[in-house]
Image (cartoon, rainbow, N blue to C red):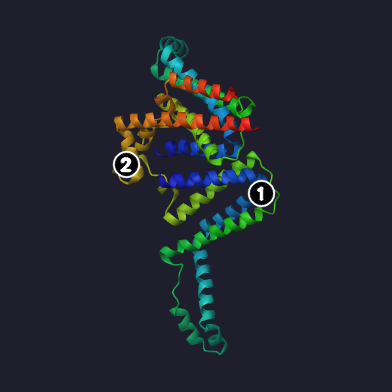
Amino acid sequence: MGPVDIFFLLLVAIWGAIGIVRGYHKELGVTLLLFIGLFVLIFLEAEFSSQVDKLLQFIAGPDPGKQAAVAALFSCGFLIFVTFIAYQGEILRFPGTTNNSFLSWLVGLLNGYLFAGSLWYYLSQAQWPLNVVQPPYSQLYTAIYTVLPPAIFKWQYLIALIVIMIILRVIK
Amino acid sequence: MFTLFIIASVMAIFGVYGYRRGFWSMVVALGVLVLGVLLITRAPEQLAKYFNAIYMATVLLFKGGLGAIASGNLDSAKELLGSVPKPFSGENARWALFIVLVGATVFGLLLSLLIKPKPSIWGLVLGLIYGYVLSVNAVRILVGGSTAELFPEAGAATQGPCSGLAGRLVCALNNPQSSAMCGTLILIGVAVLVIVAVISASKFSKKG
């Protein structure tokens, strides 16, 4: 079960390259949208868990495994949709140039961590729907799993970051 | 882990290079590299043999072997040839393959410079593929064996000791206390990075 963690780490590295190419001013818009997407998912899970459980029961039936799979597929689909919009649209662009490659690379890596890390977390939480990955998991896998975005980010933290980013963007 | 970072870094570098050079430039570079890789994988023994032959011919030339052949003294030339060690044999044969890989890389990239650069996202994709093909083959040649060795199975990692920097880091993350501290550090790091980047961007807007 080595390649799946390596696959996601490679995704993060590729996002780092995309960051250098696009520049941090464009990548920050993606970061903001990813924060908002993660905030929605984590907030729903934390504050509306009983309603979400009822909805999942209605959609997937009484089987907890199927419920987890539906929740994971919904979360991943939502994040992919948010990321697609973030990269396709011209919205939420921060000023700046691509001159600072190091900063662009770091912000690109952050976006990769937020996107690939969240997908990894939600799919793993549902024991990988469709049996695409099966245990035993590697030590690296279990180690990284504990520091994936949905595992460490609280919605309060995310909303604070979102507000700070918007205020700093608007203030001249 | 270390190998993974090398592969990812090379992919990232060539991804950026590919974006800046454009699609057709990377097609040319990748084409030459693939030819080199095909040579390396299909005919490694012949390559080592040719490199040995080139080396021995050069040594023969410098040690006066050609003079011995010209004067008809074949026995002396044969003796001289026998005394020259073959540099690309056994374990060292891999260096012949590595030279071919480096040659294909340099030649392909030089050839690609003839094409006018035109940044494109497809150039980035080809650049990433280029980086992957180059780094995986370079590591395979230098480390030896198959690509399976680059990605060790879970069993080996689970049973292995917490040795080396990467091993110690993984073991530390598996400890709940260390993992909580690492999580906090990530939270702080992300906040600092985002704030620094946004402030840096807004500074630019003030200048503009």
Nearer to the camera, B74 or B170:
B170
Q: Earlier in the sequence, mark 2 or mark 1?
A: 1
Where the C terminus of chain B falls, by quadrant?
Answer: top right
Determine the residue positioned at 52% across, 68% down. B51
Query: What chain does mark 1 sit on?
Result: B
Which residue is painted at 59% across and 36% down in the image? A23
Taking the image as shown, residue A44 lies to the left or right of residue B120, namely left
Q: Cβ–Cβ below 8 Å for labels 2 and 1?
A: no
Q: CA distance from mark 2 to mark 1?
A: 42 Å
A154 vs B3, nearest the viewer: A154
Q: Which mark is residue B168?
A: 2
The answer to whether any part of residue A128 appears in the image is: no
Q: Residue at x 53, y 76 (%)?
A: B58
Chain letter for the residue marked with disc 2 in the picture: B
Q: Amino acid at mark 1?
A: Ser
* Residue identifier under label 1: B25
| Location of residue B191 with respect to B3 vertically, above or below | above
Horizontally, is B175 left or right of B74 in the view?
left
Would you say B143 lies left or right of A19 here? left
The answer to whether residue A144 is above or below residue B100 is: above
